């Protein structure tokens, strides 16, 4: 057996790994999230009930900062650039977003799409800073999963009982500079 055959065999085994997935209501999670949980999730047995997840025997929560059925609008200003992000929760793992960006020269960029959390979200969160330079923990991070979009990720947290966030991405000459909200 060659090294290439060994890698292919390992890849196939990873894709067909023995995973138990118990979901109370699969319509409450994105299809991509469930498929990635089966293929790459950190564990072999997953139980999903509403925003609760048990991975093997570790209990966790899919944090919901955006209330279901409501649109949350986040605004930011940095280096004479204006940012506006409208978020609406679709299910426990997905949000829809509408992003507006105006640079200092008045160029406008608008974008709409869907962001989803990754199946390995429970492994840990990162840190960001608010506009005053204070660190806060990332409660939710949504990835756009579409390289044709300008945004690559939307990171949300809470500071002083307010939702704050940053977006990341760059394309078509618009540098988003870790835009603050």
Image (spheres, grey):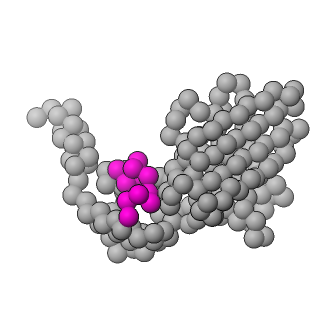
Please say if 106 is above or below 128: above
Drawn side of residue 154 relative to residue 103, left or right: left
Quadrant (top left/top right/bottom left/bottom right) for the N terminus: top left
In the current view of this chain or complex, which residue is farthest to the left? 1
Which span of residues is magenta-colored?
25-35
Which of the 4 image quarters holds residue 57? bottom left
Depth check: 181 or 129 in front? 181
Spot occupied by residue 32 in the image (x, y as percentages of width and height): 40, 48
Residue 112 seen in this snapshot: yes
Q: Where is 21 relative to 17, above or below?
A: below
Residue at x-position 76% and y-position 65% = 162
Q: Residue at image x 83%, y 40%? A: 82
Q: Is residue 63 magenta?
A: no
Q: Residue at x 81, y 48 (%)?
A: 76
Residue 80: % across, % down: 89, 38
Residue at screen point 65% across, 28% down: 171
**Is 28 inside the magenta-drawn segment?**
yes
Find the residue positioned furthest to the top. 172
């Amino acid at each position: 057996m060659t090294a290439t055959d060994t890698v292919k065999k390992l890849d196939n085994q990873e894709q067909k790994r023995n995973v138990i997935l118990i979901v109370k209501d699969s319509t409450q999670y994105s299809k991509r999230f469930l498929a990635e949980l089966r293929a790459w999730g950190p564990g072999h047995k997953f139980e999903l009930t509403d925003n609760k997840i048990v991975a093997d025997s570790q209990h966790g929560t899919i944090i919901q900062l955006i209330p279901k059925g409501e649109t949350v609008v986040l605004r930011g200003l940095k280096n004479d650039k204006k940012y506006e992000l409208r978020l609406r929760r679709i299910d426990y793992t997905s949000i829809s977003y509408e992003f507006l960006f105006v640079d200092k020269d008045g160029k406008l960029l608008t974008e709409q799409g869907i962001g989803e959390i990754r199946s390995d979200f429970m492994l840990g969160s990162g840190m960001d800073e608010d506009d005053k330079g204070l660190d806060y923990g990332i409660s939710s991070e949504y990835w756009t999963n579409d390289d044709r979009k300008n945004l690559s990720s939307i990171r949300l947290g809470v500071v002083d009982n307010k939702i704050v966030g940053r977006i990341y991405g760059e394309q078509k000459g618009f540098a988003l500079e870790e835009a603050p909200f």
